[in-house]
Image (cartoon, rainbow, N blue to C red):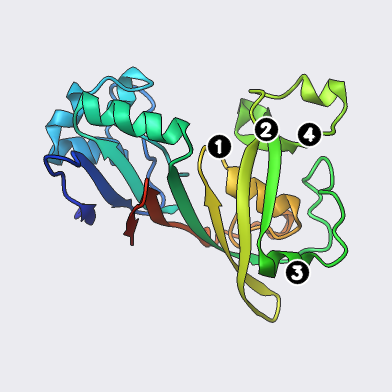
Amino acid sequence: MNIKIIHQPQEKENYIVAVKERNIPTAPLNLQDKNNFLSLMINQFPQIKNVKGKKEIEYGLIHRIDTPTVGLVLIALDQKTYDNLLELQTQNKIRKYYRAICKKVPDNREKLQAFPEIEDLERELQEGLEIKSYFRFYGKGRKEVRPVAQNSSQIALKKVDKKVLYNTEIKLICKEDNQYSFDCKITNGFRHQVRCHLAWLNFPIIGDPLYNCLEKESNQNNQLEFRAYKIDINGIIYTM
């Protein structure tokens, strides 16, 4: 596979920013798994394996994007760079931007609770809306997540995976009939965060089989209309 490299490693910026194609996992499941983006990158940059990451098999990988998502991934090539990038991420100085194409649904029934009602939601989205929640895993094999609001009951809060509030900034870019394009920004991230937050607002992403009730009902196999198109690393910006 010919991987598009957005940023080649340099002496002061010894990391890679590259485009992961759709429908390939970001990271391996185990040491034998080679069918993933990180393993392909290691074939080109074997020094990645010298980095000790959060998990043994993830090496210099700074963050993941979902398997059906196309977009930018950041990988460090040495330990010092990895540690510096991880610290920036902890300080919310690595910003990840996504473009999502959605359809508004009257009631996305897979949600376990409704997002607090906003009188003029579309106007708020045009101006820019920040969504905050905790998250908990959900369903068979914990393959999905569900948002848990700050004012939820103690029973709901006990199910939260980490007592961390995850923020998604959402801005409506354009609307054509019932098709909405959103710009979304996060710093720290949880699995499926943006996808789940959009569904929470009743704007699930087109082609999302997990968080779009209409996709489940029609059993469609459309591609996920979602891409990670920009990364801002403490003011240094990379785009697809």
Disc 3 to disc 4, C-alpha distance: 23 Å
Give the mark nearer the N terminus: 3 vs 2: 3
Q: Nearer the viewer, mark 3 or mark 2?
A: 3
The disc label shown at residue 191, or none? 1
Figure quadrant of residue 94: top left
Would you name the residue on which mark 2 appears? 135
Label 4: which secondary element: loop
Report x, y in % for residue 225.
53, 62
Q: Residue furthest bottom?
A: 177
Q: Are marks 3 and 1 in contact (CB under 8 Å)?
A: no
Disc 2 to disc 4, C-alpha distance: 10 Å
Figure quadrant of residue 93: top left
The foreground one among 107 and 16 is 16
Label 1: which secondary element: loop
Q: Residues within 10 Å of mark 4 (few under 14, many from 20)?
A: few
The disc label shown at residue 150, or none? 4
Q: Residues within 10 Å of mark 3 (few under 14, many from 20)?
A: some
Residue at point 70%, 52% (across, down): 199
Report x, y in % for residue 118.
85, 59
Label 3: which secondary element: helix
Residue at point 60%, 33% (across, down): 143
Q: Nearer the viewer, mark 1 or mark 4?
A: 4
Give the mark nearer the N terminus: 3 vs 4: 3
Q: Is residue 167 above or below residue 181?
A: above
Disc 1 to disc 2, C-alpha distance: 9 Å
Q: Can residue 61 be seen by looking at this rendering?
A: no
**Amino acid of disc 3:** Glu
The disc label shown at residue 122, or none? 3
Report x, y in % for residue 240.
33, 62
**Amino acid of disc 4:** Gln
